[in-house]
Image (spheres, rainbow, N blue to C red):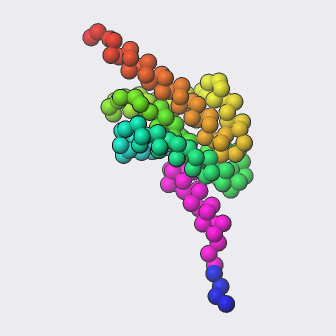
Amino acid sequence: MRSDNRNPQSAKTSLALAFATAGGVGYIPIAPGTFGSAVGLLVWWLLPHGVAAQSTAIVVLFALGCWAGNVAEHHFGRTDPGHVVIDEVVGVLITLFLNPVTWKGAIAAFLAFRVMDIIKPFPANRLERLHGGLGVMADDAMAAVYANVALRAIIWSSSRLVI
């Protein structure tokens, strides 16, 4: 009988942690959430900018983030571990969703999301209490909805400015 040293559970955990940390970005010791948000900008830039591609990416990454967040919480032994940054990646995608922006606007989206993610206005602050990976993802998704609305206001007001 052949001995097989591969552990499917370890492979699943490794895959989930790689996804949850956005390929290891979450292990950056200073401001991992900010670097995770930067990964979100990169993903946004690489995606086709149509409604179908953006919405599909958001839904798929959110669902996978819930799974990976569950695994990461179990692995790290704590709720919403700081190494998990897939929620920031999805947050930036939600912030930019259906907003017609150039790179200048994308930077504004990045900043708006970081502010909303840090202050977590109601009900985002309550959503982080949800169990497991859903709690990891939901609070950032709600903060991103606020950032999306703020970005729309910035775009609207800047188009109205007379210079």
Q: Give the residue at x 63% y 81%.
A: 4
In percent of width and height, residue 16 lies at 59, 56
**Residue 97 or residue 24, whichever sits in front:** 97
Q: Which residue occupies the extreme front position in the image?
A: 52
Q: How many marks?
A: 0
The answer to if 11 sits in the magenta stretch is: yes
Using the image, determine if residue 31 lies above or below residue 115.
Answer: below
Q: Give the residue at x 67% y 90%.
A: 1
Q: Which residues are magenta?
A: 5-25
Q: Is residue 39 visible?
A: yes
Q: Give the residue at x 63% y 29%.
A: 124
Q: Quadrant of residue 142?
A: top right
In percent of width and height, residue 65 lies at 58, 47
Question: What predominant SS class does the magenta segment belong to?
Answer: helix
Q: Give the residue at x 52% y 47%.
A: 60
In percent of width and height, residue 38 lies at 44, 41
Using the image, determine if residue 157 lies above or below residue 85.
Answer: above
**Residue 104 or residue 2, whichever sits in front:** 2
Q: Is residue 34 visible?
A: no
Quadrant of the snapshot with the C terminus: top left
Q: Which residue occupies the extreme top position in the image?
A: 162
In percent of width and height, residue 77 lies at 72, 52
Using the image, determine if residue 65 lies above or below residue 118.
Answer: below
Q: Is residue 100 left or right of residue 121?
A: left
Q: Which residue occupies the extreme bottom position in the image?
A: 1
Q: Is residue 135 left or right of residue 147?
A: right
The answer to if 154 sits in the magenta stretch is: no
